[in-house]
Amino acid sequence: MTGFASLPPVTAAGTPADVQRSELEALQDIHRVLAGARFAVLTGAGLSTDSGIPDYRGPGAAPRAPMTYQEFIGAAENRQRYWARNHIGWSHLRRADPNAGHAAVARLERRGLLTGLITQNVDRLHEDAGSLNVVDLHGRFDQVVCLDCHRRFSRQLLAGVLDELNPGFLERARAAGAVEMAPDADATVEDSKLIESFIVARCPACSGTLKPDFVYFGENVPKDRVERSYAMVDAAEALLVAGSSLTVMSGLRFVRHAAKQGKAVVIINRGATRGDDLATIKLDAGVSGALSWLAAELPEL
């Protein structure tokens, strides 16, 4: 792949900044950058919004204050509040289906265009769509881990246990209007009495503390996932970011790494990102549609 360094950063239609190119023109530029190259893909919550899962920081997203790891381990009442909310969020998130964007990424992989896929999402929709070489950077919502014995268990299995411990809880929560969901299977619950009545399950192996098997704010991404992700970027000629604001360093570091190596960085996201100043091309547009276009138009190697 040659010539990408000479392309000026562009902003497509729909951004607050002056419009420089139409969305199609920007996609055609992205096509010229990526055609003939193998590239890594980094995805964020903006890719799953078309599956009915809200994002954290996209335009119109409600302000959120996710529980930190320190809060979770610091007090039993925090864990009670979290698991009550998570049980509601789980019942919603597990019904989500992959959208056209997930399918497009899977097609790109099947055609041999990707060195790998790094996702900041915990929803497992990439895997459901057929992607195979995936780093679930922030973990996965369909597993729980014991903080004491470190065994892992199915979240589906735990859902049954929580239903037995809290009969009728989900029905009461829905009746109370607990409908605000978050991309990490969290949910807003305004009924404090409902939360205070929730019984938290213990580890079935050691009676220890269970935690969803994903990375909380204030918690480090496991080293092996970071190393696998860097390897995907190192093996690539470019990095495509789709649906991430790059607000947290866990994703931004890969953009900085690719840019430092002189590789093209393409960002497709609604709204500004922390990586915009490093982008070869930035397209402010719907992620699913843009990825579908690229999957249809990019030639096989």
Image (spheres, rainbow, N blue to C red):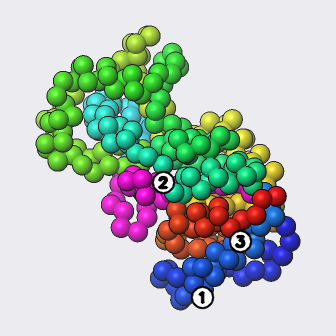
Specify whether 245 is left or right of 183: right
Q: Which mark is residue 99?
A: 2
Task: Please state which of residues 154 and 137 is positioned toward the viewer in this rendering.
Answer: 154
**CB atoms at circles 3 and 2 under 8 Å apart?**
no
Task: Please state which of residues 14 and 194 is positioned toward the viewer in this rendering.
Answer: 14
The amino acid type, in three-letter code, at marker 3 is His
- Classify 10 Å Cα crowding around label 3: few (below 14), some (14-19), many (20 and above): some
- Which region shows up in magenta? 39-65
Image position of 220 with respect to 76: above or below = below
* Sequence-first disc among 2 and 1: 1
Q: Which mark is residue 31?
A: 3
As helix, strand or loop, the secondary structure at mark 1 comes to: loop
* Sequence-first disc among 1 and 3: 1
Specify whether 135 is left or right of 196: right
- Classify 10 Å Cα crowding around label 2: few (below 14), some (14-19), many (20 and above): some
Q: Which residue in the protein does label 1 denote?
A: 20
The amino acid type, in three-letter code, at marker 1 is Gln
The amino acid type, in three-letter code, at marker 2 is Asn
Q: Nearer the viewer, mark 1 or mark 3?
A: 3
Residue 274 visible somewhere in the drawing: no
Image position of 83 with respect to 243: above or below = above
Whole-percent x, y for residue 256 in the image: 70, 60
Q: Is residue 129 magenta?
A: no
